[in-house]
Image (cartoon, grey):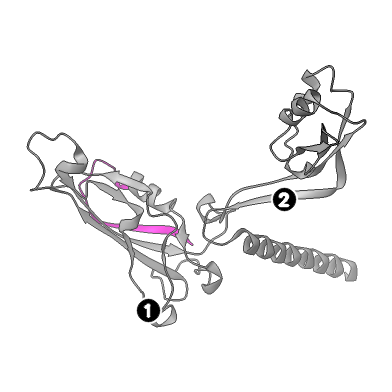
């Protein structure tokens, strides 16, 4: 869910209406999109099953209790910074009954939208709809997604003493650990998964031939970072469902072409 339409009733800030609408559209909304339907093309008015309505109404004024010699805007003005926490949900239709316990609001409360001065105000109404990242990035619940192969680190011979300490510093924290065996410091691979392949080891001529770096070719590590709309594990499971649906449609197309 993301802001699709912004109805500006009053905006006397220095931020133009178009820029303000763009900033509002990129704020992630904490609402489960699986509870809503896609809005039909051509529908101007939203309904309770496909639209969420939010309002941002705030006005800046002077703080009568501020010190006369103060020059800090935080002391001089009230509501001079407009944050995402000022956005409030306005239920449409019977949404108040459908989502009695839902905490429908921006994911983060501290996103700065605009700055005001006394007498300036913002009064807008926003309509949020369901969409996909292919149409616009604002609909994507994923911030970053990447994958890598599982690192495979092998010590070709025992590494002891100061060389073990140097080896530990060549890798990411947690990859190499030092064991005390019969009074000697001995290095061992603790968790190769945490390695980032910095290749720092190859800067040390006395160590680079004692370690073999490789990757497990059939072991992939996927990293998915959420914008906060849905947990990462839910995002992965939902993405797999979409992939399965695409595969089924492709197979159906193959079957239909084969029959023709």
Q: Position of residue 175 (x, y in %)?
A: 75, 39
For this rendering, which residue is in front, 48 or 188? 188
From the top left corner, tell me how far across and down residue 116 is, in percent: 22, 44
Q: Residue at x 72, y 36 (%)?
A: 196
Residue extending farthest to the top is 205
User: Which one is in front, 252 or 49?
Assistant: 49
Examine the rendering and report whether any part of residue 161 can be seen.
Answer: yes
- The residue pinned by badge 1 equals 96
Q: Tell me, yes or no, if residue 117 can be seen here.
A: no
x then y, percent, for residue 137: 54, 50
Query: Which quadrant is home to the C terminus?
Result: bottom right
Locate residue 245: give its quadrant: bottom right
Element class at badge 1: helix
Which residue occupies 43% across, 53% down? Answer: 27
Q: In percent of the image, x 35 and y 64: which residue is there?
A: 54
115 to 6, vertically: above or below: above
Measured in 3D between alpha carbons, the distance from the residue under mark 1 to the one under mark 2, in whole angstroms, is 38 Å
Give the residue number, with chain letter if any, for mark 2.
Answer: 222
| Numbered range of the magenta stretch | 1-17
Q: Residue shown at 72%/63% (left/top)? A: 240
Disc nearer the start of the sequence (1/2): 1
Q: x%, y% of residue 92?
A: 36, 75
Residue closest to the eye, 81 or 249:
81
């Amino acid at each position: 869910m993301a802001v699709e339409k912004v109805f500006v009733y009053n905006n006397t800030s220095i931020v133009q209406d178009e820029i303000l609408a763009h900033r509002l559209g990129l704020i992630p909304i904490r609402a489960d999109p699986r509870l809503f339907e896609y809005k039909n093309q051509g529908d101007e008015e939203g309904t309770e099953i496909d639209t969420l309505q939010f309002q941002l109404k705030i006005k800046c004024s002077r703080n009568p209790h501020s010190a006369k010699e103060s020059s800090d805007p935080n002391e001089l003005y009230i509501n001079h910074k407009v944050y995402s926490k000022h956005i409030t949900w306005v239920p449409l239709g019977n949404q108040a009954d459908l989502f009695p316990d839902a905490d429908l609001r921006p994911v983060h409360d501290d996103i700065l939208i605009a700055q005001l001065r006394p007498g300036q105000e913002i009064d807008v109404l926003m309509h949020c709809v369901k969409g996909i990242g292919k149409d616009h990035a604002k609909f994507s619940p994923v911030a970053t997604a990447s994958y890598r192969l599982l690192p495979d680190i092998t010590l070709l011979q025992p590494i002891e003493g100061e060389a073990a300490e140097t080896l530990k510093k060549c890798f990411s924290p947690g990859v190499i650990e030092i064991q005390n065996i019969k009074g000697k410091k001995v290095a061992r691979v603790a968790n190769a998964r945490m390695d980032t392949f910095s290749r720092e080891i190859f800067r040390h001529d006395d160590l680079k031939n004692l370690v073999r770096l490789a990757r497990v070719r059939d072991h992939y590590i996927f990293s998915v970072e959420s914008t906060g709309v849905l947990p990462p594990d839910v995002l992965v499971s939902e993405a797999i469902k979409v992939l399965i649906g695409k595969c089924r449609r492709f197979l159906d197309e193959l079957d239909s072409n084969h029959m023709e």
